[in-house]
Image (cartoon, grey):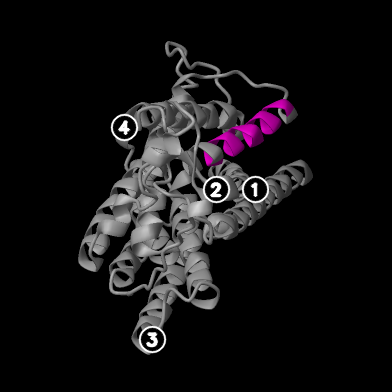
């Protein structure tokens, strides 16, 4: 009897520790995801192609450090696919921020990200096993409330100030000494759109990015789910999510490099870089990489069906606060009331999702 009580107490203690680690990782991830674009917000990033490459290089550096700390776990190439999917969505980030603003743009793609990631985990899409929770009705309610918040956020109007600085624009490669005379204008295609076009195109890009972001964890979950199948090539693979960070982030950097090289070819070997955005872009990548590592930990200790609604909805609150308090992108009582309502719904949805696991 005493031995049974000891084992039972140990199990309760372990579960409590896992929940504490999972929710702590989620909180850190929410704060950093909601703030990672702040360092680069006031710097001109042009069409975003050079910026995304710097961002992804920084992300890969973090993954290399994590890989060394974990003593170089087995590298699964399939995990790179998730990174490729994420990087494809990431090339739309700068145009989204330019058209919708940091707060609203992040809120929309995060909400779509939430639904895609939650549904794929909960119902076992893309060949992964469906995940179970203690209270499924709370999980459904939490995901539904988070989705409703996305509709409310669409009614929030933003005032996005363009950042232009001719001195920051320098061709990365010059074919001749007089190449600057024939350089294309610093004005990006976004600057040529009307307000209505910006809102429509920005919203469509944010939705597309959200679908890609929400699918990025599927390869890792697939490998883990097939680790117990002796006939699978993934038999015996690690159940610790952080072991796949290096492969995942390598896929991000490789894909972003390919896109940047294609961009260089399209620009006829005269791509534009923005020197003042390099350091802020690198810092932005560090923040994102740390946040995503925390997300991997949250998936490990809470399961993706719980972590997705929390981590994808939460950053929108942080980003909107930046937009209201610092960048002044969101103004007016009507917008403030919409945000407050959306905040309450997102918070309620996150709490319901969290309680579904306990």
Which numbered mark, 3 or 2, is in the foreground of this view? Answer: 3
State how far apart marks 4 and 1 are (Cα): 27 Å
Image height check: is 45 above or below 127?
below
State how far apart marks 1 and 3 are (Cα): 43 Å
Which numbered mark, 1 or 3, is in the foreground of this view? Answer: 3
**Residue at 36% from the left image edge and 48% from the top image edge:** 185
User: Is there a contact, CB below 8 Å, between mark 4 and mark 3?
Assistant: no
User: Is there a contact, CB below 8 Å, between mark 2 and mark 1?
Assistant: yes
Answer with mark 1 or mark 3, whichever residue precedes in sequence. 1
State how far apart marks 2 and 4 are (Cα): 21 Å
Question: Is 57 in the magenta?
Answer: yes
- Where residue 111 sits in the image (x, y, percent)? 36, 58
Q: Which residue is mark 4?
A: 126
Residue 302 — which label?
Answer: 2
Which numbered mark, 2 or 4, is in the foreground of this view? Answer: 4
State how far apart marks 2 and 1 are (Cα): 7 Å
Q: Which residue is mark 3?
A: 332
**Residue at 61% from the left image edge and 34% from the top image edge:** 242
Residue 18 — which label?
Answer: 1
Instruction: Point out the image quarter for the C terminus.
Output: bottom right
Answer with mark 3 or mark 2, whichever residue precedes in sequence. 2
User: Is there a contact, CB below 8 Å, between mark 1 and mark 3?
Assistant: no
- Where residue 264 sits in the image (x, y, percent)? 40, 29
User: Badge 3, how many Cα within 10 Å: few under 14, some, many 20+?
Assistant: few
Magenta span: predominant SS is helix
- Where residue 196 sits in the image (x, y, percent)? 21, 66
Residue 31 in sight here: yes
Answer with mark 4 or mark 3, whichever residue precedes in sequence. 4
Q: In the rendered structure, which segment of residues is drawn in magenta?
A: 55-68
């Amino acid at each position: 009897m005493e031995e049974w009580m000891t084992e039972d107490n140990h199990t309760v203690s372990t579960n409590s520790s896992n929940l504490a680690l999972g929710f702590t990782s989620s909180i850190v991830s929410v704060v950093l995801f909601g703030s990672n674009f702040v360092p680069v917000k006031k710097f001109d990033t042009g069409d975003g192609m050079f910026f995304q490459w710097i961002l992804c290089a920084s992300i890969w550096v973090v993954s290399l450090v994590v890989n060394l700390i974990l003593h170089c776990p087995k590298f699964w190439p399939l995990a790179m696919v998730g990174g490729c999917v994420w990087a494809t969505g990431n090339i739309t980030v700068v145009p989204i921020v330019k058209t919708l603003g940091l707060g609203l743009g992040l809120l929309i793609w995060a909400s779509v990200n939430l639904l895609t990631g939650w549904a794929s985990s909960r119902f076992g899409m893309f060949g992964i096993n469906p995940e179970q929770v203690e209270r499924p009705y709370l999980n459904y309610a939490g995901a539904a409330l988070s989705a409703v918040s996305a509709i409310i956020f669409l009614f929030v109007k933003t005032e996005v100030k363009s950042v232009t600085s001719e001195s920051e624009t320098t061709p990365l490669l010059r074919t001749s000494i007089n190449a600057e005379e024939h350089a294309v204008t610093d004005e990006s295609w976004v600057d040529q759109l009307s307000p209505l076009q910006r809102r429509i195109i920005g919203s469509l890009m944010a939705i597309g990015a959200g679908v890609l972001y929400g699918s990025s964890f599927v390869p890792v979950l697939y490998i883990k789910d097939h680790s117990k199948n002796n006939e699978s090539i993934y038999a015996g693979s690690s159940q610790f999510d952080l072991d796949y960070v290096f492969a995942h982030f390598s896929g991000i950097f490789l894909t972003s490099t390919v896109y940047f090289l294609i961009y260089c070819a399209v620009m006829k070997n005269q791509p534009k870089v923005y020197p003042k955005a390099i350091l802020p872009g690198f810092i932005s990548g560090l923040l994102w990489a740390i946040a995503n590592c925390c997300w991997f930990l949250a998936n490990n200790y809470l399961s993706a069906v719980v972590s997705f609604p929390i981590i994808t909805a939460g950053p929108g609150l942080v980003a909107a606060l930046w937009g209201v308090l610092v960048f002044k992108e969101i103004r007016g009582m009507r917008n403030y009331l919409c945000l407050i309502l959306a905040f309450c719904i997102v918070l309620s949805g996150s709490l319901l999702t969290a309680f579904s696991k306990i």
